[in-house]
Image (spheres, rainbow, N blue to C red):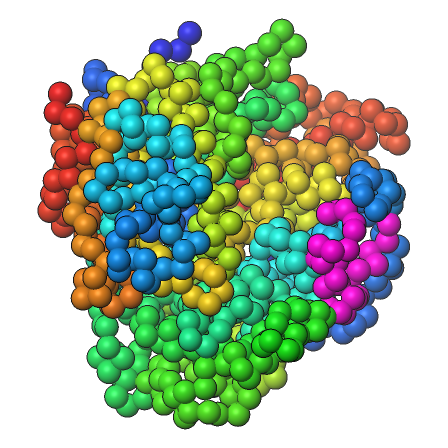
Amino acid sequence: MLSRRDLFRLSAGAAAFACPGLSKLAFAAAGRDPGLLILLHLRGGCDGLNLVSPAEDGDFIAARASDLRVAAEGTDAGFPLGNGFFLHAAAPGLAELYKQGHLAIVHAAGLAAGTRSHFVAIDMIDRGIADNAQLARATTGWLTRAGRGNAVSAATTPGGELLGAASALALPNLAGGVAPAGGPPVAAALERLYAGASGPFGTAGRQALESLAAIDRRLPRDATGKVTLETKAAYAGAGELATPLQTVAQLVRMEVGLTSATLDLGGWDTHENQAGRFRNQVVKLSAGLAALWEDLAPWHDRAVVVAWSEFGRRLRSNKSGGTDHGRGGVALVLGGKVAGGRVAGAWPTLAADRLDEGVDLAVANDIRAVLAEALTAVDGVPPPPAVFPGFAAQPLGLFRRS
Amino acid sequence: MPSSRDPVFLTYALARAGYGPAPGDIDKAARQGWSGWVEEQLAPTADDPVLAPRLASTLLRIRHGGGDGWDAVDEMRPLERLGKPIEALWPLADGKRKMDGAERRRPRDEVVAATLLAAVHSRWQLKELITAFWHDHFNVDFYGSDTLAATLPVYDREVIRAHALGNFRQFLEAVATSAAMLTYLSNRSSRAGAANENYARELFELHTLGRDAYLNDRYDRWRAVPGALSGQPEGYIDQDVYEAARALTGWSLEDGAGIDGRRKLPESGRFAYVESWHDGYQKRVLATEFQPFAAAMADGRQVLDLVAAHPATARHLAGKLCQRLVGGRPPRLVAAAAAEWSRQAKAPDQIARVVRLILLSPEFAAARGAKVRRPLAVAAGFARAAGIDLLPTEGLVNAIAGAGQRLFGWPTPTGLPDEDSQFLGAQALRQRWALTLGLAENWWGCGNPTPPAAATFGQAVSAWQIMLLGAPDPEAGNAILAGLGWSADQSPGRPGMPDTARKLNRLAALTAMAPAFHQI
């Protein structure tokens, strides 16, 4: 039986061979429980004001079409969160986690730099930087620099936070097993073909073969050899998020030495006909996170889940019934040590003179403050400066002092 | 610099400027020389004697259950939606018409099948590759809705293919007025008063100037952008996006929307300019004043003129074309290609001229191994080299998607990224290896390889290596045979026997699983 971290020792060793210098980054500090950080990217720019509305705020009511606001009362009323905020009515799972104190919400969160481009914003957040001018030189992701490259991305490619982490694995699903097709002779030929291969493709191939074989050996199977995921929760309702979440939960259960995981939920770029589309998105998000939380019950004190988006959306809707790219958004922080049940951080208000460029909820809480506190909670110590260059701590108090 | 007639050079060159050589291609290209091949490919004619009969005769399965108003279907059907105009396709998305979703999405599925056929069989390989480049550049997610699925044949035929080697400014307007893009980036519902910024933003950031020219974090007033006061701003800021969105209001579609209380647009899917939805007041885009109440479409056209002619657009597109064709962005080549792009701005074959410059550059010749084949290129390249008379099937389409390329189904407007790292995820690599094995062993009903005659496994593996890689590679051959437990001097069996073919095909798959096939 492999011990914890063995899997990632294997691939980290291969990485060290190919890229000297990366090997140290690929390990969490030895001998200490590294905890588990799970990052869910709400891709496309989630309308934070529609997910968590200041529903009784006069400025908000005046500016926003009613179908893009959470109602404070009536048949479709949202969940009251205190301080005038209401959570979308399609998020009962999140409301329950909030009530239990496991979930904290940070509003008006985002990048300090003024970008309304998806792709610039995502790249900057992934790299942990706040200055566009650093982008060209920032060649590693913040998780990589935080020493959390023993990671899985439940996607076709590793998340941008893991850029440069040779040990990061991209595994969107496990259901069919992960050994190479063609059986042991093909696997043996592949191993020989890639044993001495050089170049990025050859190196990636060799690492993939090692990691896939190690994971495949440990996958639970029934008597006929079919993979049986040991899901402890119902992911129904989570839509396309179900399989990636189950993949992460299964790898956590298998104790392969995972220190972080990343996944994506797209579909938040609601320039048009937002009301119905947004509701569907919220259903998936809420059901998915609630199921993951249930599935990971034995790991609650070790795990932190952060759901984030590259920006929020325009305060005023456009005439397509949608909203365009904005600034301040919402981040969700879930964990056993989270000081939850509250909307944390500063609230800049929606008063006309407080809006970013006169049109958007301003960014009052640096997204890096959210990520840094999550990292501190799992690491036990604040991240070194290189993880978030130029970042000055801005305490949000998202975690209980233990 | 390798000889322009060297078979190994030509094998890699044809894999980067097309989908790789089919049997006979290397001999022909060696007679033409590299520049001869490029010139022929840059002047494609309508004549495609291998592809045309296959497009006409291919049957693609359609299967769906019965429903309220329609019967269950499971049949092989010709590609009959491919040549249809938008008026014939648009009604398929109409929810009031009773039909199964598979029928609504059939136009998309036929283009997917035709794309696979063309990648494998077209004699105009370069045009196929450049067509794929533009589909990525002007990405539309045709899996996003039934409406989008219905628009793909016209987008592919009249927008992308019609302009792939043509003039970029004309191309841009064809994209901007297409049912596919107007729907995907929602400009069709943009209205004066609160314009929808979706298309305008991606027009700047993705289609033309590029994100390197997005200077919003540095400047928040148009006058502050360097060059603005002389009418030549170095880049753009959010204000340019907002104003361009206003300029493009009224560019819409005949989608049945109501214009006012009395009038409705027809439901044909054709482009429509609706004056009353257009914001006619004065604007400023890229430091250029737009006069109020200009003629119909003049505001939008002026935006397209400005972004098409901007030097940042030349750099952005030159860089992307180099990334695709060379596998990197060598600074000298990008600069030379950008200069040619700007110099030929009015030429009807502007894009072809830039592609020629890149393909005939020393950087292209020296770039062997600089690029990882994309999943479609793995499948098509293997099928071509292994002599599979490919029949496109849903199974193959899904296998290519598993390796990281859902054809016509990339969700975000960036298009499938062109960086190698996109394709190196562990599961994606596993499925990439399975792709050649599945084709070699005909898992998806696409057809069988044509194995070479060989007296021994050793001869067989080197024959496959010549077909797939341009030259024998004894070390890799030994690795494959040792892994499979076969010896080089052993006979694969009697020629023509099923078991012999099975072994030879497995050798083809393993040959194509080697890094040398993927790193081109």
Q: Is residue A331 visible?
A: yes
Q: Residue A53: x, y in percent?
A: 32, 48
Residue drawn 38% across and 72% down? B241
Q: Is residue A287 above or below residue A395?
A: above
Q: Quadrant of the N terminus of chain A?
A: top left
Q: Horizontally, is A96 left or right of B375 in the view?
A: left
Whether residue B94 is in magenta: the answer is yes
Q: Residue A203: x, y in percent?
A: 44, 36
Foreground: A120 or B49? A120
Q: Residue B45: x, y in percent?
A: 76, 74
Q: Which residues are magenta?
A: B77-102
Q: Horizontally, is B97 left or right of A313 in the view?
A: right
Q: Residue A367: x, y in percent?
A: 24, 46
**Residue that protrudes farthest toward the front in the picture:** A74
Q: Horizontally, is B194 left or right of B169 in the view?
A: left
Q: Is residue A298 above or below residue A358?
A: above
Q: Is residue A275 above or below residue A338?
A: below
Foreground: B519 or B210? B210
Whether residue B30 is in magenta: the answer is no
Foreground: A341 or A160? A341
Q: Horizontally, is A222 left or right of A10 in the view?
A: right
Q: Quadrant of the C terminus of chain A?
A: top left
Residue drawn 64% across and 20% down? A183
Q: Is residue A207 visible?
A: no
Residue A160 lies in what quarter of the image? top left
Residue drawn 19% across and 34% down? A398
Q: Is residue B138 above or below residue B24?
A: below
